[in-house]
Image (cartoon, rainbow, N blue to C red):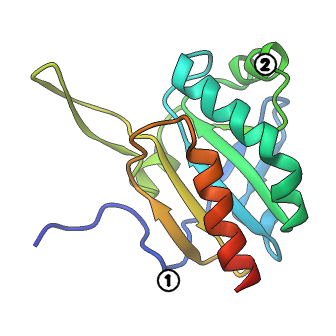
Amino acid sequence: MSEVLWPEAGRPAPDFSLPDASGQVHSLADFAGRWLALYFYPRDMTSGCTTEALEFSTLMPRFVELDAAVVGISRDAPASHEKFIVKNDLTVRLLSDPDTAVHKAYGAWRLKKAYGKESMGVVRSTFLIDPEGVVRRAWPKVAKAAGHAEAVLKALTGLAQG
């Protein structure tokens, strides 16, 4: 049996303290008392990551209705996040994790295989964290960015109203 590399449903979410696009540091504790959709993505300005960020931004009012925040994390610097947000009119908060410590804590930094080669990299992943800081749903490997935000919203709706 293989070891699970990410926080499973029912486990406490790993803590984090990371800067956003303006340099303000945000921690898991900042979201206590509300739901958090925490997603990891490979890189600002790429097509799949832009699609995902735009879809989360479009659905943001529905997340807010469910008392949920949406936060994206990548290795990009805060300045890159700022450009990404401005260029695409994003409403999601983006945090910078250049040393991948938080990626590793959530299992989003893993060995990947592409074109016959193996290398470490970001695996698109999402975690729904409840108001008490417990992971309630995990998507450890998001196959397709398009439509993923809707799937997260649907899961959150069921959990928040359940």
Tell me the residue at 55%/35% (across/down). 146
Q: Secondary structure at mark 2?
A: helix
Q: Quadrant of residue 47?
A: top right
The single residue placed furthest to the bottom in the displayed view is 162
Residue where numbered disc 1 is placed: 10
Residue 120 image offset from top left, x and y in percent: 28, 33
Kind of residue at badge 2: Asn
Residue where numbered disc 2 is placed: 88
Q: How many marks?
A: 2
Kind of residue at badge 1: Gly
Q: Is residue 105 above or below residue 109?
A: below
Could you tell me which quadrant the C terminus lies in? bottom right
Instruction: Tell me: 86 left or right of 144.
Output: right
Residue 78 image offset from top left, x and y in percent: 72, 26
Q: Which mark is residue 44?
A: none
Could you tell me which quadrant the N terminus lies in? bottom left
From mark 1 to mark 2, how far is it between C-alphas?
A: 35 Å
Tell me the residue at 61%/67% (across/down). 155
Give the foreground label among 1 and 2: 2
Task: Pick whichever of labels 1 and 2 is earlier in the sequence.
Answer: 1
Q: Secondary structure at mark 1?
A: loop
Q: Is residue 98 above or below residue 73?
A: above
Structural crowding at the residue carrying mark 1, measured as other residues with C-alpha within 10 Å and reported as few (<14), some (14–19) or many (≥20): few
